[in-house]
Image (tube, helix red, strand yellow):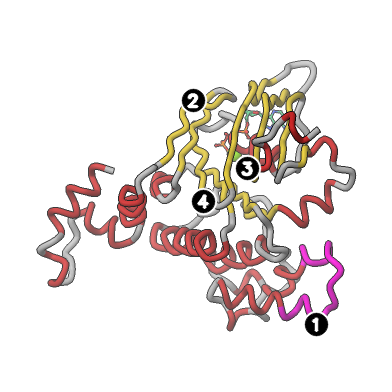
Amino acid sequence: MSSEKPMAADYVLETRQLTRVYGERVPVQALRGVDLRIRAGEVVAIVGPSGSGKSTLLNLIGALDRPTSGEVIVGGTPLSQVRDLDRFRGQTIGFVFQSHNLLPTLTARENVEVPMYELPMRPAQRRARATELLGLVGLAQRGDHLPNQLSGGERQRVAIARALANRPAIVLADEPTGNLDSATTAEIMALLGKLNREQGVTLVLVTHNTEVAAAAQRVITIRDGAIQRDVTMDSQLERELLELKSSALGQAILRGDPLPPALADLAPRLHELLERV
Ligand SMILES: Nc1ncnc2c1ncn2[C@@H]1O[C@H](COP(=O)(O)OP(=O)(O)OP(=O)(O)O)[C@@H](O)[C@H]1O
Ligand SMILES: [Mg+2]
C-alpha cells in the first residue's frame, strides 16, 4: 500500500488537487486544485491579494474546514482517514490566528495550557510546560497577567507559546503580525525564526506584510484560488540577507537612517545588497 506514493512521508504537509467551494446558491470557488508539498522544517509564506484563498487554504491544511474535493496529507496521513480530527489537530498542529484570540478571562499561563487538555497530562505538568513556553517567548514574568494586561506583541507571543504547547510538527499562522508595529513585527518574526531553527518547527504563515514574507525561505503566491508562484530561496546567503532585510537594522539601512559609527562605513554596500534580494 505504501509503495503507491513512496514520496508522501518526505513531506510534512501535502495537498492534492485541493478545492473548496463555498455556498450553494451562489457558489464561490475559493480554491481551484491546489497541489502543495512542504518539507519538515521549512518556513513558507503564503501571500496574495485579499480574497485569493489564503485563509481558506490554511483552514483546510489545519483541518479546521473540509475540502470540497482533493486531499490534505499531514505527516503521511490523509486527513480524510483520520477518525478524531480534533485530537489529531490538537497533537499535530499549532495555530497562531488573529481570529483565535486569547481567552480574556484566563491568564497568559492558563491560555498556554488550553491545548494541553487534549493530552493526558497532570495539572502540575501542564503548568510546568506552560511556564517553560512562556520563558521561551520571553514572557516568564507575565504568566499571571490577563490578556488585557499585555501589549499586542506580548499577546501574540502568548499565542505563539500556546501554539507550541503540544510540540506540534507544524505551526500555521494567519497574519501573525497583523496588528503590530514594524519593530514588534520584526521581534515576532525573529522569535518564529528561532523556534524554527532550534525546534525544527515547520512554519506556514499567511501574510500581507512584505517584511514578513521576506523572512521566509519560500514564498507561495495565491491568486484566484490557485498557486501562481512558488519561489524557494536556495542559497543560504540570500536567505540570511533576506533575514537581515526584514530586521529592524535592515529596515534602518534601507531607509538610510543614521547608523552607529561601526556600521556607517558598511551601510552603502549593505544597502545595495539588500536592494538586490
Ligand atoms: N465562509 C464563507 N462563505 C462564503 N464565501 C467565503 C467564505 N469564506 C471565504 N469566502 C470567500 O472565498 C474567497 C477566499 O477567501 P479567503 O478568506 O480564503 O481569502 P484570503 O486570501 O484569506 O483574503 P484576505 O487577505 O482578505 O484575508 C473570497 O472570495 C471570500 O469571499
Ligand atoms: Mg485571510
- Please, which residue is most extreme toward the right here? 83
Q: Is residue 247 left or right of residue 84?
A: left
At numbered mark 2, what does the secondary structure look like: helix, strand or loop?
A: strand
Q: Quadrant of the N terminus?
A: top right
Q: Circle 1 sits on which residue?
A: 124
CA gap, disc 4 to disc 2? 23 Å
Q: Circle 3 sits on which residue?
A: 10
CA gap, disc 3 to disc 2? 24 Å
**Residue 111, percent across and down?**
72, 68
Q: Which label sits on residue 228?
A: 2
Label whose residue precedes the other's in the sequence (3 or 1): 3
Q: Circle 4 sits on which residue?
A: 178
Prevailing secondary structure of the magenta residues: helix
Residue 234 belongs to magenta span: no
**Residue 234, percent across and down?**
39, 42
Amino acid type of the residue that numbered disc 3 sits on in the rendered structure: Asp
Q: Residue at x 67, y 81 (%)?
A: 144
Q: Quadrant of the C terminus?
A: top left
At numbered mark 4, what does the secondary structure look like: helix, strand or loop?
A: loop
